[in-house]
Image (spheres, grey):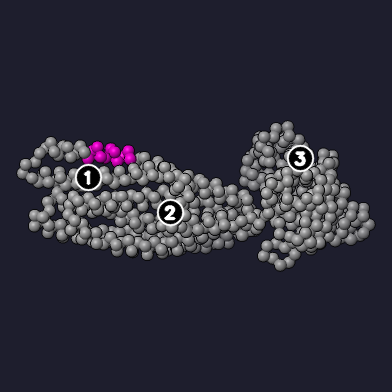
């Protein structure tokens, strides 16, 4: 019953709906107890030598009216109890989604997407059943069982009632034991379902890679293994779940046997009428539901408890990102000073960035180059506050970035990642994602800066073209340029391009960089790239290697140093020359 206590906040919030719904269940229970009593009276009238037709008609009329009222009351409680339980699912789902949006990168490293989706679907559904079916089962079984027992005592025979109900304590005890087993099995079943969700999500997202390497059969075998685990875990739950009905039928059968034997003796001794025995058998039949409900209730509560534990475990995890109270909402249009002494990813020992120290003056463009894994993207993650746990500081206008209002800070930065994620909507909606109210004119202006406007207009639906999931219908270059347009459309104070020109040709690259130089003279820009042509016109170029700044200077200065930058530039220049291009 602890799950009811844990959901007490919701029951208190919706107490009017639940009280009225439960009251309807109480009235139904009262009305139901009249039926066997009236049927018994009709049987006694028929069995008597002086049957009165008028009395039979009256009893039948009362039964009909009772049925109509039960129909109305049942409709009402369904609306109040089941309808209100849907509110709980909505509240928890909204809280969970909000929690997901507030969590940091570390959280998503620890939890797979499919697992989180399972929490937001299966687990929330199990909790909703507690607030709906669980309340119904508890209230209805208490009212129906209680009213039936009282009627059996008052309207039939108290001795027969006591003896017939002897199996009830054994039923409750056995149901508790089975319910405990279900709780343990359901936790394992939910965990295996989460693993299957993650597997499907990962395989569907990477289906192109799977097909390219011809690994379909291997992936299918892996999926079979995961689904076998799901079946095995659910079979364990089903095994115990299947014990409930036979368990109830066993003890119900014992009650019927007791009723027939002892009731027959009482009728034979003229201590009980035939009609009363018929009524009592009907009452025993009515007790099947409360006894069945006991088993179902334990089942529901154990499942709900297991799911609630999983949801609470997510809510208990907090973001490691510091959020300042009354954070600063101005001042990003200023000089930056990045001084990172040391940064390690969570649960890692080796530093990814060390002794990073440079200034970015307002309006400057800085280029960052280096081998794969040198720390370029990690540096951007710190600028975007995906991680706050590093020694050192990042300041804008002398103010730590941790002291800015998070929403203001992030909206002041335009970021184009290496992995260009597009939403499965239109091109226009993707570009104006940061501000859906933007006019078509501003959307097209941003697209022109990213040199994608003409390409979009050539598409059959133009800016209303649906891009498909993650932009599957577009080429890599198109996705990159749409992502750049999305970052430019709000005219951010700081623009970060993380190797965002790798999929476009040299001519398009130069046009985009030229456009950026023209329109962002008073805005700061950081460009990370593997092609030296992307950064050679920057005001300052940093060369990273193993998380350290190895070289600093302009293009001419770095060429004069004849270090890594010089060697890479000359290599790419030769490659371009051989391909008939230029650098």
- The residue that label 2 is drawn on is 4
Position above or below: 252 against 446: below
- The residue that label 1 is drawn on is 35
Tell me: 89 left or right of 45.
Answer: right
Is 569 or 316 nearer to us in this picture?
316
Earlier sequence position, callout 1 versus callout 3:
1
Residue 51: percent from the left, percent from the top?
9, 41
Is 213 or 391 nearer to us in this picture?
391
Q: Quadrant of the N terminus?
A: bottom left
Of tags 1 and 3, the one toward the viewer is 1
- The residue that label 3 is drawn on is 491
Q: Is residue 322 visible?
A: yes
Residue displayed at 38% across by 60% down: 241
Q: Marks 2 and 3, how far apart in space?
A: 51 Å
Circle 1: is it few (<14), some (14-19), or many (20+) Cα within 10 Å?
Answer: many
Circle 2: is it few (<14), some (14-19), or many (20+) Cα within 10 Å?
Answer: some
What residue span does the magenta drawing correspond to? 63-73
Residue 54: percent from the left, percent from the top?
12, 36
Q: Is residue 236 magenta?
A: no
Of tags 2 and 3, the one toward the viewer is 2
Circle 3: is it few (<14), some (14-19), or many (20+) Cα within 10 Å?
Answer: some
Earlier sequence position, callout 2 versus callout 1:
2
The secondary structure that most of the magenta stretch takes on is helix
Hey, which residue is sitting farthest front in the picture? 326
Q: Is residue 544 visible?
A: no
Residue displayed at 24% across by 53% down: 149
Q: Quadrant of residue 79?
A: top left
Of tags 2 and 1, the one toward the viewer is 2
Hey, which residue is sitting farthest left in the picture? 49
Q: Is residue 71 magenta?
A: yes
Element on which disc 3 rests: loop
Q: Marks 1 and 3, how far apart in space?
A: 75 Å
């Amino acid at each position: 019953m602890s799950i009811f206590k844990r959901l007490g906040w919701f029951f208190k919030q919706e107490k009017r709906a639940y009280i009225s719904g439960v009251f309807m269940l109480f009235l139904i229970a009262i009305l139901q107890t009249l039926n066997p009593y009236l049927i018994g009276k009709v049987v006694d009238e028929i069995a008597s030598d002086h049957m009165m037709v008028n009395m039979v008609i009256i009893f039948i009329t009362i039964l009909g009216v009772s049925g109509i009222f039960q129909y109305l009351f049942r409709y009402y409680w369904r609306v109040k109890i089941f309808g209100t339980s849907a509110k709980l699912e909505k509240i928890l789902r909204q809280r969970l989604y909000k929690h997901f949006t507030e969590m940091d990168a570390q959280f998503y490293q620890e939890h797979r997407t499919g697992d989180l989706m399972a929490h937001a679907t299966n687990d929330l559904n199990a909790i909703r059943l507690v607030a709906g079916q669980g309340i119904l089962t508890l209230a209805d079984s208490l009212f129906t069982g209680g009213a039936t027992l009282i009627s059996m005592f008052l309207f039939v025979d108290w001795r027969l009632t006591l003896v017939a109900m002897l199996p009830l304590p054994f039923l409750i005890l056995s149901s508790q034991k089975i319910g405990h087993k279900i709780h343990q099995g359901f936790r394992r079943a939910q965990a295996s379902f989460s693993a299957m969700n993650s597997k499907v999500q990962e395989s569907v997202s990477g289906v192109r890679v799977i097909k390219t390497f011809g690994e379909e059969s291997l992936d299918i075998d892996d999926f079979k293994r995961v689904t076998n685990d799901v079946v095995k875990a659910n079979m364990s739950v089903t095994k115990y779940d299947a014990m409930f009905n036979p368990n109830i039928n066993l003890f119900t059968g014992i009650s019927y046997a007791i009723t027939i034997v002892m009731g027959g003796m009482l009728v034979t001794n003229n201590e009980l009428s035939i009609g009363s025995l018929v009524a009592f058998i009907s009452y025993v039949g009515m007790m099947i539901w409360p006894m069945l409900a006991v088993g179902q209730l334990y089942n529901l509560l154990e499942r709900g408890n297991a799911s609630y534990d999983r949801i609470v475990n997510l809510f208990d995890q907090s973001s490691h990102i510091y959020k300042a109270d009354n954070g600063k909402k101005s001042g990003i249009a200023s000089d930056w000073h990045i001084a990172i002494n040391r940064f390690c990813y969570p649960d890692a020992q080796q530093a990814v960035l060390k002794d990073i120290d440079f200034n970015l003056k307002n309006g400057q463009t800085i280029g960052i180059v280096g081998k794969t894994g040198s720390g370029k993207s990690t540096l951007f993650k710190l600028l975007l506050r995906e991680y706050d746990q590093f020694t050192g500081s990042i300041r804008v206008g002398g103010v730590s970035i941790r002291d800015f209002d998070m929403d203001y800070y992030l909206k002041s930065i335009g970021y184009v990642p290496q992995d260009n994620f597009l939403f499965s909507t239109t091109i226009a909606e993707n570009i104006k994602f940061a501000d859906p109210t933007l006019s078509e004119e501003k959307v097209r202006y941003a697209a022109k800066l990213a040199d994608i406007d003409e390409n979009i207009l050539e598409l059959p639906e133009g800016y209303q073209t649906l891009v498909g999931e993650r932009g599957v219908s577009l080429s890599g270059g198109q996705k990159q340029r749409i992502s750049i347009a999305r970052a430019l459309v709000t005219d951010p104070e700081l623009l970060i391009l993380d190797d965002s020109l790798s999929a476009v040709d040299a001519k398009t690259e130069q046009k985009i960089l030229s456009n950026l130089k023209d329109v962002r003279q008073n805005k700061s820009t950081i460009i990370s790239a593997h092609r030296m042509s992307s950064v050679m016109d920057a005001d300052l170029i940093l060369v990273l290697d193993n998380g350290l700044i190895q070289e600093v200077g302009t293009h001419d200065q770095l060429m004069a140093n004849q270090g890594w930058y010089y060697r890479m530039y000359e290599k790419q220049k030769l490659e371009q020359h051989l391909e008939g291009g230029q650098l």
